[in-house]
Amino acid sequence: MDENIHLSETCVIDMKNHTVCRRGKILKLSDIQFRLLGLLIDHTGEPVSVEKIIECIWGNKFGEQREDVRVQIRRLRNRIEIEPSNPNIILSVR
């Protein structure tokens, strides 16, 4: 994985330093949010199931907490998207 990943013209991830910068401002992401973002980047252009997210981020100990995945996705969108209610970076497939 590249060290710097441009999610958009205004949002860049520094994988080496575990930081996200949007419009020149460093965003604070929780460890879970950063790992979730990394997982989604690893699967750019393809859907990632809720089950896969649970397995990769929390492992078996987390169980089937589907609502917690939705919450973390929403929190991540709120941090990196310019318009979280109209996302361009993290899209959902139903």
Image (spheres, helix red, strand yellow):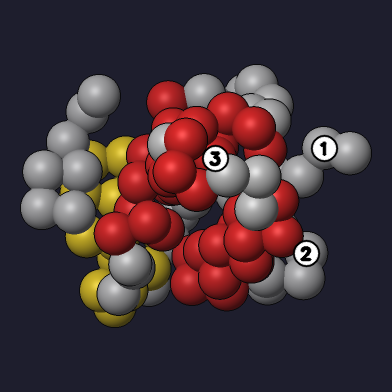
Which of pointers 3 and 2 lies earlier in the amino acid sequence? 3
| Number of the front mark, 3 or 2 | 3
Which of pointers 2 and 1 lies earlier in the amino acid sequence? 2
Residue at position x 42%, y 26% in the image = 42
Position of the N terminus by quadrant: top left
Instruction: State the residue in front, 31 or 23.
Output: 31
Indicate left or right for 78 with 59 as reference: right
Where, by quadrant of the figure, is residue 38 drawn? Answer: top left
User: What's the distance in space between the residues labelled 3 and 2, CA to CA?
Assistant: 24 Å
Note whether 91 is above or below 86 in the view shown. Answer: above
Q: How packed is label 2: few (under 14 Cα within 10 Å), some, or many (20 or more)?
A: few
Residue at position x 43%, y 36% in the image = 59
Specify whether residue 37 is in view: yes
Name the element at disc 2: loop
Q: Amino acid at mark 3?
A: Ile
Residue indicated by mark 1? 93
Where, by quadrant of the figure, is residue 83 drawn? Answer: bottom right
Whole-percent x and y of residue 93?
A: 82, 37
Specify whether residue 77 is in view: no
Q: Amino acid at mark 1?
A: Val
Name the element at disc 3: helix
Position of the C terminus by quadrant: top right
User: What's the distance in space between the residues labelled 2 and 1, CA to CA?
Assistant: 14 Å
Q: Residue furthest left?
A: 17
Q: Amino acid at mark 2?
A: Asn
Where, by quadrant of the figure, is residue 49 drawn? Answer: top right
Whole-percent x and y of residue 86?
A: 78, 64
Q: How packed is label 1: few (under 14 Cα within 10 Å), some, or many (20 or more)?
A: few
| Number of the front mark, 1 or 3 | 3
Residue indicated by mark 2? 86
